Amino acid sequence: MTRAVLAVLARLLPPGFRQRQRAEWAADLAELAPAGPATRWRYLLAAAWTLPRLRSALRPAGLPRWSPPGPRALLGRPGDRGIVVVAVLVSLLSGLFGAAFAVQAGLSLLSAGTTGFTGDGATPPGLGWVVASGAGLGAVIGWLLVGWAGRRAGVGSPAAYLAGAVLWPALLFAHTMLVFTLAGLPFEDVGVGYPDLLWLLDSRLWWLAAAAVGALAVVAVGGRAGSANRRTK
Amino acid sequence: MRMTTPRLLALRVFLDDPVQERYGLDLAQAAGLEPGTVYPILVAFETAGWLSSREEEIDVRAEGRPRRRYYRLTPTGLAAGRDAVTLAAQRRGARSALRRPAW
C-alpha cells in the first residue's frame, strides 16, 4: 500500500525528478520499517503535505513548469492528448445536436407545411441528407470551438481548470446517457425512427450543451489570464 | 533565499560538521524536523548551489533498499549558510530586544 502511495506522490512530481525523489522516499521508508506502520504513514503524510513546496523548490532549477494532468491537459495546448479526446467527444455531441436541429428544420421544410413530425411517422424523402449535413456541420463546429479554446487557454490558468472541471463531467455524463439510451432502444417502441431518436436525445441532453458552451465561454473570458505561463515549444 | 525556521535548523546541522554528508532522514532526525519534510529544503539549497548531492554507491540487491542520496555543503553554501545563520541570530536578537519590557 505504501508503495502505491509513493507511486502516486512521485507521479505528481516532474518526470525528470520523479525517480530520484521516489528512491529517497523509499530508502527512508525502508529505514523506518522497524518503527511500525504508524510511523511510515506519518512519514507519507508529511511527504504529501510538503509536496507543493517540493515542487515549487524545483522550479528555479530550470526544470519545466508542471501542472497535474487532467484539466490542464484538457484545455492546455492543441497538441495535448487530453484536448484531442475532448475535441472528439465534443464533436460527437455537437454533431448530434446538429443532426437534431437539422431534423426539425428538415421536417418543416420537407413536410409540406407541417412544422412537426409527420403524423403517420413516415420520414420525408431527402431528410437523411439534411440530417447528415447538420451532423457534419455540428461536429466541425464543435471541433473548431475546442481547438480555439485550447489555443486560447493558458497552461494552468484558472480558466482552463474551471473549464475542465465543468466540461469533463458533462461530457462523460452525456456519453454515458447516450450509450444507455441507444442500448435501451430495442426495448422501447419498435416504431422509433432516427428523427424520433434525435429528438429524444436532444431533449435529454440540451443542458449538457449549455454546460459545454459555458465551459468554453469561461475560457473565452478568462483564458488569457494564464497566457504568461504558456510553454513555448 | 528566504530563511524559515526549518531551513535554519537544517542549515545548522550541515554547519555543525561541514564535511559530513547527510541523507534526508538522517538530516531530519538530526535537525529535529518531521521526517519526510526535509526534501523541499534540500532541493531549495541544492538549487541555490549551497549543497551538492551524490547517489550512494551500493549493491541495491545486497542491501535490500534503494540507494540513498547524500548531501554536502559546497564552499558557497558554507559561506552563505554562515551568513544566513548569523543574520537570523541578529534578527532574533533585535526582535527579542524590542519585545523586552522598558521598565
Image (tube, rainbow, N blue to C red):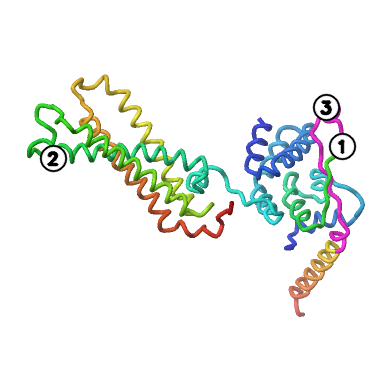
Residue bounds of the magenta highlight: B57-79
**Residue B81 found in image quarter:** bottom right
Q: Are marks 1 and 2 on the same chain?
A: no
Element type at mark 2:
helix
Mark nearest the camera among 1 and 2 is 2
Dot label at residue A223: none
Element type at mark 3:
helix
Question: What residue would you read off at disc 1?
Answer: B57
Q: State how far apart marks 1 and 2 are (Cα).
A: 80 Å
Q: Quadrant of the N terminus of chain A?
A: top right
Question: What residue would you read off at disc 2?
Answer: A109
Q: State how far apart marks 1 and 3 are (Cα).
A: 12 Å
**From the viewer's perspective, is A11 left or right of A105?**
right
Question: What residue would you read off at disc 3?
Answer: B61
Q: Is residue A65 magenta?
A: no
**Residue B87 found in image quarter:** bottom right
